[in-house]
Image: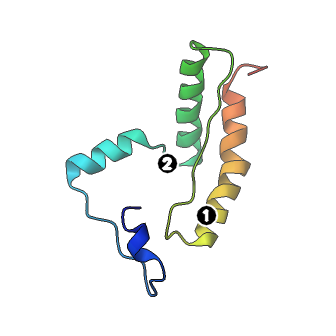
């Protein structure tokens, strides 16, 4: 987002993000949920279980679109999330959660 002002009106392909070293990539991967639908559902359920100790409500917000992503890929990810991840999370949580 740092180049947003300079990008106004720019034509052509988007520039690639800066390269990450191994340490930076590992730190980023530790903060995001990424994987198969089963792996993603398991991680979300872990957050829900941890949030239960904090209070009665848990809201999970997912972001599947980032600047420069192909819109078809975003739609496919959203469909997969709705069809496989959400039902799997529901199956992992106690009734009423």
- Judge the density around disc 2: few (<14), some (14-19), many (≥20) Cα neighbours within 10 Å: few
Q: Position of residue 94 (x, y in %)?
A: 71, 19
Q: Which mark is residue 58?
A: none
Which residue is found at the position 43% from the left and 83% from the top? 13
Place residue 50 in its image quadrant.
Answer: top right
Q: Nearer the viewer, residue 13 or 79?
A: 13
Judge depth for marks 2 and 1 and give the one in front: 1
Estimate the spatial distance between the alpha carbons at disc 2 and disc 1, rounded to whole Å: 15 Å
For the C terminus, which image quadrant? top right
Dot 2: what SS?
Answer: loop
Residue 50 lies, with reference to residue 30, above or below; the image says above
- Residue in front for this viewpoint, 9 or 16: 9
Q: Which of pointers 2 and 1 lies earlier in the amino acid sequence?
A: 2
For this rendering, which residue is in front, 41 or 10? Answer: 10
- Could you say which disc has been placed on residue 74 in the image? 1
Residue 35, labelled with which disc?
2
Above/below status of 86 relative to 83: above
Q: Quadrant of residue 14?
A: bottom left
Residue positioned most to the right: 96
Residue at the spot x=59%, y=29% of the render? 45
Specify the color scheme: rainbow
- Residue 22: image x %, image y %? 21, 51
Please determine whether, in this image, residue 4 is positioned above or below residue 51.
below
Residue closest to the far front: 5
Picture quadrant where residue 47 is located: top right
Q: Is residue 75 left or right of residue 28?
A: right
Give the residue displayed 53% in from the left and 41% down from the top.
Answer: 39
Q: Secondary structure at mark 1?
A: helix
Q: In x, y percent, where is residue 83?
A: 73, 50
Where, quadrant-wise, is the N terminus in this rendering?
bottom left
């Amino acid at each position: 987002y740092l180049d947003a002002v300079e990008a106004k009106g720019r034509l052509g392909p988007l520039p690639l993000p800066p390269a990450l070293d191994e340490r930076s990539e590992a730190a980023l991967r530790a903060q995001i949920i990424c994987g198969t639908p089963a792996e993603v559902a398991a991680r979300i359920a872990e957050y829900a279980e941890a949030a239960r100790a904090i209070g009665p409500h848990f809201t999970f917000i997912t972001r599947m679109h980032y600047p420069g992503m192909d819109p078809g890929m975003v739609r496919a990810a959203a469909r997969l999330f709705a069809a496989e991840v959400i039902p799997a999370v529901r199956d992992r949580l106690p009734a009423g959660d």
